[in-house]
Structures are given as C-alpha cells and as structure tokens.
Image: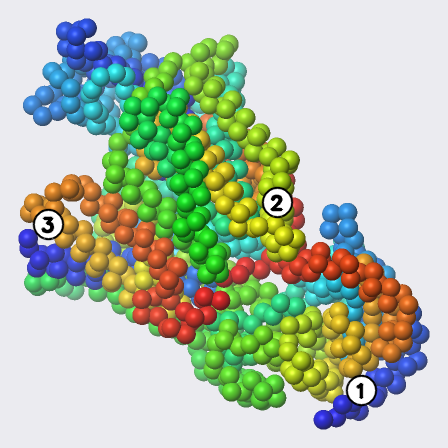
Amino acid sequence: MPANGQRALEAQAVLAGVPKVPGAPKPDPILVASSVVRRFGGLSAVDVEHVEVQRGSITALIGPNGAGKTTFFNLLTGFDAPDEGTWSFNGRSMGRLSPYRVARLGMVRTFQLTKALNRLRVIDNMLLGAKGQRGEHLWASLLPFLWRRQEANNTERADLLLKRFSLDAKRTDFAGSLSGGQRKLLEMARALMSEPELIMLDEPMAGVNPALTQSLLQHIKMIREEGATVLFVEHDMDMVHDISDWVIVMAQGQIIAEGPPGDVMKNPEVIDAYLGAHHERALTESGESLTTGDTI
Amino acid sequence: MDLTFVLGQSITQALGVTAIIYCLAAMGLNLQFGYTGLLNFGQVAFAAIGAYSVGVIVISFGASLWAAIPIGLLASVALALVLGIPTLRLRADYLAIVTIATSEIIRLMVRSIALRDTFGGANGINGKMGQAFHDLNPFHADIDLPFLTWTRQDLWVVTVGWSLIAIFTLATWLLVRSPWGRVVKGIREDENAVVSLGKNAYVYKMQALILGGLLGTVGGIVWAIAKQSVQPDNFVPDVTFFSYTILLLGGAARVFGPIVGAIIFWFLLVFVGEFLNQMIAAGWITFLLPTDVGPIRFILVGLGLMGLMIFRPQGIFGDKRELALDAR
Amino acid sequence: MLSGALLAGVFACLLLAFAPPAAAAGTAIVGTLKGPDGAPLANVSVTASAEGFTDTVVSGPDGVFRIEVPKGGKYLLSVDETTLPAGVSFTKPEDQSRSILVLMGDKKVLFGFSSGDGGGGATASSFTWARISQLLVDGLFFGILIALGAVGLNLIFGTTGLTNFSHGELLTLGAFTAIVLNELGLNLIIAAPLAVLISAMLWGWGQNKILWKPLRRRKTGLIASMVVTIGLAITIRYTLLLLFGGSPRSYQQFAGQSGLAFGPVSITPKSIVFAILAAIAIAATVSWLQRSRIGKATRAVSDNPALASATGIDVERVISVVWILGAGLAAFAGIYLGSTQDVTWNMGQRLLLVMFAAVTLGGLGTIYGAIVGALVVGMFVQLSTLFIPTEMKTVGALFLMIIILLVRPQGILGRRERVG
C-alpha cells in the first residue's frame, strides 16, 4: 500500500513553506474563510478570524469536544447560518448558499452521526450520490429511455467504488443492515459518487473498530491521490498524525494553532486546550448531534 | 341471517365507488407519506377541493363539468403550494398540524352560512353535477349478480375509476423506481443526507405534496360525479385517517398498497357492519343497538391504524426484512 | 367539528326546568330561546314528540316556551327553522332537534344558533363597547381553558418530542370521568377533583405506561408515533360514543346558572370559579417547573434528553410525571368545558386544533409560549366575531397559526432551532 504517494509528497512540500501560525495563508487555497461567527444565545460557538485550506492536501480540523468544529462544518456547508462572516470555495463566494448548492459546487460533506439511508439498498445509496441525473427530474423520470444510459454508467461507477470500499458483497442489502463501520464507508463512498473537489468528513473514525480504522485511513489517502482535497474533523490527535498533511486546531470556537501534525502536537497551547477541556467532555458530547432533520 | 346479502354488500362496496375514492386518496398519501415521509393529515382537503370545484362550477355557476375538472386540479396545486411553502422547510409535525387545520378551515368555510350562496352551507350542493360524464355512459343495463349489484351509472363510474387507478398506479410505479423516486425515498430516510449530496429536498417534497394532493383531488372529483352531491360533513378529518389506515393495511411505500388496502378495508368494514346489523336484527346479539354498529366500525379503524403503524407499517403482506429495520 | 360550539356565551341556551310531579299539575318542558347576541327569540315554533304524543307551542316575547307532557321519558324536541327570525339559523343542521330525557331536576339543552348572513350590516351594528368587553372577558376565559390543554400538550411534546393528536381526547376523557362520578351521585364539587386525579393516573400515567413507553423502547419514530396518536384518538372517541351515546350530557350541578352582571359584562359564577382555579393550576405548574427538582429535570429533558440522561436524570420518570400532569390539566380543562357547555364524545377533538394554534403561536416546546399563545388565541377567537361570522371564528385562529408559521415559525417565544 503506498502510504504516501506522489500527491502527498507534493502537498507536504508546498505546505512546508507555510508559516505555522493560526490563519496562515496557503499558496493555493481551495477554501478561504474570514471572520466567521456563530453565536448560540450569549455563547460564541464559532469565532474564526481567518483560515485557508490548501488544495490537494489532507487537512485535519482538530480540537477538544465542544470546540465548535462541527458547527464550523455546518456553517461552511450551508447547514447552519452564521451571524457574521464570509468564505469562498474555488474563489467563489459561498455565504448563505443553500446546502444543496454548496454540494453541487463540489464541496461535499459527511456527518458525524452517519446518515446511511436505512431503507434504501446499498447500491441505491450510492446512486443517490451521482450528480446531474436526468432521471431525477419529475417528468423525465416517467420516461426511462431518457435516463437509462446515464443510470447504467452511474451504476458501473458505483460498483467500482463499492468494490474499492469492500462493500460489493452488500450491494443489494438494505443500508440499515450494515455495521457502524460499514456505514461510515458507505457514506464516504456515496460522497465520492458526486466527484467532489473538496470532501469534508465529520469524524470519519468515530465509533469504528480499529481494524476498519486502518482501512478508512487508507481510503482517505486514496482520495487525495486521486486529486481531491480532504478536510476532516477529528478529536483524536493520534489518528490525525498518521494521515494529515496539515492540522488546524480549534478550541472554544477559535483557531488556536496551525501547522504540520508533528509541530502542532508539541504546541503547548494545544496540549493545554486538550487537557483543560477533558473535564468538560461529558457536557459537550451530545451538543454536536442536534439536528433539525426528522428521524423516522 | 342472510350471509349472501352480507357478502354481496361487502364485495360490492370493496370494488365500488367509495373504495375507488379512498384508494385514490391513499395513493396520494402513499406518494407523500409512504415514499417521501411527508405527514399530510389534510388529504381530505384535496378531495374537498375536487368535489366542490365540480359542485360549484357546474351547479352554482352553471358551467361545464369539463371546465370544472381542470380548474379543480389547478386549485389543488394551489392548495399544495399554500400548504407547502410555510411548512416544508420546518419539522414534519408542522406540516401535519397545518394540513389538518387547513382541511378544517376549508370544511368550515364551505359549510358557513355566509358563503351559502356559493357552497350551499351545511346542506352542500346537490344536483346533476356529473351529468356530462353520465351522458357518455356506454352501459345499457344494471349489474345484478349474486355478489355484485351496481346500477349502470355506478358501473360506468367504477369502470372509469379503476381505469384511472390503473393508470396512476403505473405512473407511481414508474416514478418510484426512477432516480426521482430514489431521491424522495432518501428524503424520507434522512433529508439532510440527501441535501448534502446536492439535491434540493424542498423541491422534491413540494412535488410529492402536489402529486399526492392531485390524486386526492381526483378522488374528490369522482365523488362529486358519482354521488351528484357534495356536503361539507363528508369531508371531515376522519376521511384522511381512513385513507391512512387503507395505506398501512396495503403497505406504505408499496405500489399496489393502496389498491390492496382499499379493497380489504372496505370489504372488512362493510362486512363487520352488515354482519353485526344482521345479528342484531335476528336477535342473536342483544347487548348492542343498531346505532352501535357505526361507532364499532370506527373503533376497529382506530385500533387498526394504531396496530398497523406499530407492528406492520409495511402492510399485512409486507417484507420481513424491512420490518427488522424499522425496529432499529 | 370546530363550529361555534365553543363558548356558551354565543349560544342560545335552552333551559329546561321540570317541575316535580307533586308540586305542579303535570310535567312540563320549559325553556328560553335566545339568539346568538343573547336577545330572546319570540314566535318560534317548538315541538316535543314521543311515542303517542306530539305538541307544538310558540315561544313568547321573552323567548320562553312551555310544553306540558304527560309523563317522564324520552322526548324529541325540535325547533321549526322556518319560524326563526331573519338572520338567525342553526350552527349545524343537526342542532335543529335534540333528544332529551325528561326526569327530575334541571336539564339544559343547547340549540346552536348563529347569526345568519354574517355580512357587514349585522355585525357592524353590534360593534359596541359592551359587546367588546363581553368578548374580551369571554376570550380571557377561553384562553385560560385552552392554556390548560396547551400546557400539557407542550410539556409532552417538549420531553418526548411527540406531537399528540389525541390530546383533545384527554379533555374528553376527563369530562366523562367526572360525568360518571357525577351520575353515581357525587356532587360535582367532589367529582371534579376526583376525576382530575383519576384521569391523571389512568389516562395519563396509564397511557404512557401501556402505550408510549413500550413504543419508545421499540424506538418507534416520531412520525409513526403521530399516526398512532391519530388511531388512538379515533378509538377513544368512538368508544365514548358507543358507551355514552351521542347526545350531549351535563353535570347535575350548576347546569343552568345565570350570569352575574359586571357592568356590561355577564359572567356565570361557575366560569369565574373555574377560571380562577385554572389560573392557579397553570401558575402552580409553572412554578413547579421553575422550582422543584423534578420540574427542573423536566426542563433539562426538554432542552436535551441525551444530555439530561447523561447527567443522571431519570428521563423515563420525568416523562411519567409529565404525562400525569398533562392528563390532569387536560381533565380539568375538559370538566371546565363540560360544565360551561356540555359533555359530548367529540368535545376535546373540537378544541385540539385551537390548542395546536396556541402552541404553534407561542412556540412548540416552550411552556410560557403555550400560555401566552393560548391567551392570544382565546382573545383572537372571541374578538374575531366582531368581524367574521361566529361559525367561522376558529377559522380565524387557524389562519393566524398559518401566518405565524410563515413569518416566525418558532413562535412568539420559541428559540430558533439549531441545525446539524
């Protein structure tokens, strides 16, 4: 397994010249956010002055629980509205865009609590990820000859991805029958169906058994090798060390440090934030799982 | 005790006009609730729109039935938009509350004395509103078989009604196995997941609400044409809940669910009612009065609705594997 | 369903007094016909009929009529619609006749009348300060009544996420529990609190225990649960219809109370007593939520069940308490409604949507929201009759709810929902 391929070396080489300070400018940023603030009541859940994500890299967004990572993700992807702030993706301003438009522009996310669509088969979960489907239009859907070829192509691509993620044996099972780790894989594979430029993974390793974690990490590296950018949220620093090219640290809504994984982990401020926050852990655990989505 | 009569009544009703109307309403709910997960508790409003469009336009305004039908369908789309715009961005229960409230608003308005000249108040609108349709009747005789009795008018309505249901079932089948159907089923499972994949869930939900409402409206139009009379108190919320029971009986998110459900539902309901009536009349049951039969039928519907939703939402013939998932 | 039958104030009350056989020559049905504005209806034909007996009389200038009947028993009392004055008609066609059982004592029968055309002329003329103050008071009382139901609805929603479409039936069950006790011989003063207690335990705690707790354990989704509440509502309603029949009942005490005049406003003493008790009950609930340990736990569960559970709160216990409280308040509301109007099998269902309007207006899941929303809706419903026909007054409240959802979906006092 190529632990670090061509792209990884490139990304790391480029990032080597970037100053290791919060808000550091990157040579070729795919995502740039400035003064993003989100308040809940009196509390500023997110208060990010400036941050950039380098194209073609694996960037980790880490921080103790309750640091505002998921909220920041929700803001960037349009699932939550900020009180202030602007950000751009590929140079295009993205403020206040509906989440589905964000996704269409090539910035696709996954969720901390996996959203496998339980009563859909695995293959249908995958096909849902494909973009620009003619058969998704109401009238065209009634005329199968309009979309049959596209559907066949998408199915072929989905099957390749399923194979790659070792889910091909589950192809026609309901997604609800998969294990927790398999759902994580399915969600990632589904996001890849839309051929994103930036894939944002919210705690992809949470609740996954150690054996599967290694394979997940390899998949994430593969995504980079294929040319996409990965931004992922994680609170376990050890996981981050192995795969990320660059690490951004959040605590109490703010970005407190940035740099390559080795440097960040030695940063006393980061260690402080983690140790200081461990006491409050139980209080913030469930705060990130609130959703307005309806559960059936 | 005349079991032939009881069976005959049950079969006639199970295939008759009422079953057709409820089947159409339940088909609409199947698209909305079964496939998309939208909780429309006001399906009867869409039926009322259809029935009253025919009644008002043909009888009160004296225009043609063939003008009334498209106007009714347009009004139905408008109603779906009015209901959907404020609620489809909110949590599911808001749609439920607003739809049931709207169905009551409509019923109270059409039965009001203030608007009696147009809608006929509590007495509704009566008159030959379906005549233009009945003029086309190709049948010349009534049907009088041992288990099936229809007048030639009913026979004509039933023929057209089931044909419509066949066409709409085919359309539903095409819809739900297409990529469009995949998106709405995805919305039912988890709206945010679908949105995160770049689909505008709001538009899909609106489309499902409109399509489902239109099916209910067609049911209402059939009602007005078949019964030649529309009354506000025919359009109480219980109609919606009967339709839900039918849908769950046949199985939500199953293409043939509403048809299977409507036939079984009306067969059972009429059978139980007529059977009890006969038993009471024959003096075999003495602790019930003939007037008790109505409430008993409703109680069975209520219990059926609860039991099906809890134990077998995928219908009495449903897939065990799906059942296992629901328990998660 | 949601017709004008909400407050006695807008209804013509037909009070039937039966003279005891010993005191008078015979048994008689006596009553007064009043229009929606409270004015007596003269020259209206009323017919009483039973097997082998029919008699028709015409009401006097004071709206009073008297029909001598040969003996106690069941009579069908009907009003000839054609003899009603112009502009007055029945709220519902079935109101035209009522079956009554003539025994001893007072019995009240309601004929729902509403003002006929409801057009500008008729309503504009009655646009007086006296009428406005009466409507304000009626609205306040009606608001308090709705609040009793809405608080429970909102507490249950807040702690379990369940939007309960069978909450109206909790009112009905409470009213019928009191009727049963009342007809067993208990005075309403004893029967009412007893019925509230029984309802709280049987219909609240019991319902949660038998139905909702197992469903939560099965992880039945909220949407499925809402459909279950509908099925439950139908089952309860028609079981009551089966057991008690369709004709309205009233409690044996305080049935035909006449109003006390406070300036231009007329209020019955029982309404005042009930409203004060209801206000106390609501205030007690609020202070309980603020102060007591379990009340605070309830708020914590409403805020975030997972977090509350993680911090050692027994969520199931809180939910049990909330069901007990909600059903108790609802039973109180049912008895309140039953004593100011009648007890019927679908009385709670008629109020359900108004309660939802109150809750939506105030904000789903917030307790103050439910109370404020209920008072606003109560006033709005009553005051709207200044401009729209009485029969459409609930339509106004439901419209208000939809408009609020359009402009401020979280309600007046609700918080914006967090996403993702």
Q: Is residue C401 above or below residue A232?
A: above
Q: Is residue B319 above or below residue B272?
A: below
- Left or right of C180: which side holds A241? right
Foreground residue among B308 and A241: A241
Per the model, the C-alpha gap separating discs 1 and 2 is: 51 Å
Q: Residues within 10 Å of mark 3 (few under 14, many from 20)?
A: some
Closer mark to the observer between disc 1 and disc 2:
2
Question: Element at badge 3?
Answer: helix
Foreground residue among C204 and B196: C204
Closer mark to the observer between disc 2 and disc 3:
2
Query: From where the camera sits, is residue C47 visible?
Result: yes
Tell me the residue at 15%/23% (across/down): C73
Query: From where the camera sits, is residue B68 visible?
Result: no
Q: Residues within 10 Å of mark 1 (few under 14, many from 20)?
A: many
Which residue is identified by label 1? Answer: A8
Residue C106: image location, x then y, percent: 28, 17
Badge 3: chain ID:
B
Which image quadrant for residue A161? Answer: bottom right
Residue A91: image location, x then y, percent: 80, 71
